[in-house]
């Protein structure tokens, strides 16, 4: 199974500042036939299901604010929130859908400093 | 609008089975797959398996093999997840989600399954 490891486990950032979360997979998530990385990012707030933010490593889901961006390829990926807002406090998960069983990272808890 | 509505809270004894339903609306049910993900208290999401609705093909995480069955009823646009031989560590919120390109874009509200004697 592909193991997803996120860093850091928790992060405190001031309002308006940049937040960066990293995700590493144990094998490449790049499917060469279509040149796409099978990596998604989710945001989860207490009492809610995860919400899809980013897929194909860098494609923003419809309705997601443009302060959220994804980057990276192969085995190393990053979620960036360019200017942290209060409503961004949540746990963030990376998720590989390259090969079943699809797996999630352990999560990064984002708080306001 | 896309909506996935799951069945209600379940309380089960160890060794019992549970069957959670997930009724889809707002899209062509057979065009997308359905994944099932669970989340134990205070833990991250755990992917359990998926079903390709149009042909019924399934993939399951190894740890659930032999205990889980995913099915769909296209006449009612409903997906089902059955988990057998329940243990206390199966206590979790169980989610269904629509699969888009393999990742889950729309999620159900979740079904709490508690396993306790």
Image: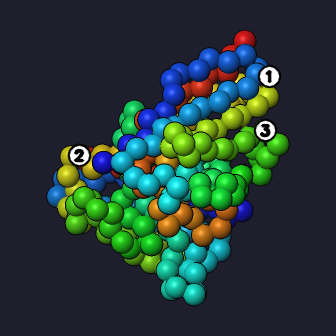
Q: Chain of mark 2?
A: A
Please indicate whether residue A109 sits to the left or right of residue A34 in the image. Answer: left
Residue B75, by quadrant, is top right
What secondary structure is found at the residue carrying circle 2?
helix
Question: According to the image, label 2 marks what residue?
Answer: A87
Question: According to the image, label 3 marks what residue?
Answer: B67
Residue at 39% over, 37% down: A48
Residue A41 or residue A110, whichever sits in front? A41
Q: Are both tags, 1 and 3, on one chain?
A: yes
Residue B28, by quadrant, is bottom left
Question: How many numbered marks have been drawn onto this rendered protein structure?
Answer: 3
Crowding at dot 3, Cα within 10 Å, few <14 / some 14-19 / many 20+, comes out as: few
Residue B11 or residue A113, whichever sits in front? B11
User: Cα distance, mark 1 to mark 3?
Assistant: 11 Å
Q: Is residue B58 above or below residue B108?
A: below
Q: Chain of mark 1?
A: B
Q: Quadrant of the N terminus of chain A?
A: bottom right
- Residue B98, x across and y down, in percent: 48, 52
What secondary structure is found at the residue carrying circle 3?
loop
Question: According to the image, label 1 marks what residue?
Answer: B15
In the rendered image, is residue A8 in sight?
no
- Residue A29, x across and y down, in percent: 58, 75
In the rendered image, is residue A85 in sight?
yes
């Amino acid at each position: 199974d592909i193991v997803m490891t996120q860093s850091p486990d928790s992060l405190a950032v001031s309002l308006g500042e940049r937040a960066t979360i990293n995700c590493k997979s144990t094998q490449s998530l790049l499917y060469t036939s279509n040149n796409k990385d099978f990596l998604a990012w989710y945001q989860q707030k207490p009492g809610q299901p995860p919400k899809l933010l980013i897929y194909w490593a860098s494609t923003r889901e419809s309705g997601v604010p443009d302060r959220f961006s994804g980057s990276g390829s192969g085995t190393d990926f990053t979620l960036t929130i360019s200017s942290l807002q209060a409503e961004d406090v949540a746990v963030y998960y990376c998720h590989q859908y390259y090969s079943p069983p699809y797996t999630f990272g352990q999560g990064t808890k984002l708080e306001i400093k | 609008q896309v909506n996935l509505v799951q069945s209600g809270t379940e309380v089960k004894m160890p060794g019992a089975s549970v069957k959670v339903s997930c009724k889809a609306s707002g899209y062509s049910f057979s065009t997308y797959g359905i994944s099932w993900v669970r989340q134990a208290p205070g833990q991250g999401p755990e992917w359990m398996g998926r079903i390709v609705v149009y042909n019924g093909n399934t993939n399951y995480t190894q740890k659930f093999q032999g205990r889980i069955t995913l099915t769909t009823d296209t006449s009612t646009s409903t997906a089902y997840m059955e988990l057998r031989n329940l243990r206390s560590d199966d206590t979790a919120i169980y989610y269904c989600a629509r699969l888009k390109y393999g990742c889950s874009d729309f999620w159900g509200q979740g079904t709490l399954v508690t396993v306790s004697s």
